[in-house]
Amino acid sequence: SISATSPPHVASASHSPGVSGPMGRKGKRQKADDEWQTVTPAREPTQPGACEGPSRVVLLRHGQSLMNLTQEDIPDSVLSEDGLKQAASWRGCIGRFGAEVVLVSPLRRAVQTACLAFEGEAAPLELCRHARELWWDEKVNTPGTPAEMRRLLRGLPRGREVQEVDEALVPGSDDPETEEDSIRRLQQVLAARPESTVAVVCHWGVINALCGANASNCDVIECEPRVGGRFNFRILDQHKPPGGPRTS
């Protein structure tokens, strides 16, 4: 198992207002270990057999985005050329993890990654609002509109199969108010799923909050529910993308 205790060195420091200098994205990630200790797990079964939801969760971080590449706070950034290659390299390989459904962050870089990686797979693709990245003050982590998403999906493999577009992109009356609340809601969504293996295509911060992993672009983290402890999931294995350059 691979467990992350410190954030990666990345070239994706945010230049958004109020987040400059050493407290850019890397600084935020450095703080994540302390901040997310305050997130109460959504479920704390007392017996291993009491776990609800899937017995296996497969977390896929998106490929390199243009924001990662340029260090600019690009609104709802799409993938870079290298990120497209990373995501497409999982095509034909990702099925070995056995996902029965794929929950996808409504941010464009995650949607592109999911459609490319799971091309040719039968598992349904569903947008999940609570799988969006943390640090909501940044433009790159602010989802677009349903119309913008549908335009993107028209050019992606399996794009017309993607479900829950409006539900994921139109805020509801019970929308989480904070990033911490969103993580708790995602934990609850996962606990309520009937499938035995669920994939989630999401982001560094979400993956780190769920299991503590330090995921590079397009890494797959295999997890299982854990009883108690700081994180909801225990890391079983971590896999690099089969192709494309290695980026963080």
Image: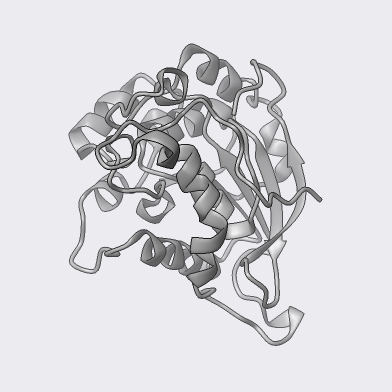
**Residue, far top:** 81
Asked if residue 64 lies left or right of residue 89, the reply is: left
Q: Position of residue 151 (x, y in %)?
A: 25, 25
In percent of the image, x 61 and y 81: which residue is there?
A: 44
Asked if residue 28 lies left or right of residue 221, the reply is: left
Give the colouring mode of the picture: one colour
Q: Position of residue 169 (x, y in %)?
A: 25, 47
Residue 165 showing in the rendered view: yes
**Residue, far right:** 1
Q: Residue 35 versus residue 106: which sits nearer the camera?
A: 35
Quarter occupied by residue 235 = bottom right
**Residue, far front:** 21
Q: Position of residue 227 (x, y in %)?
A: 70, 76
Q: Position of residue 187 (x, y in %)?
A: 50, 66
Work out whether 54 lies above or below 96. below
Q: Residue 63 versus residue 39: which sits nearer the camera?
A: 39
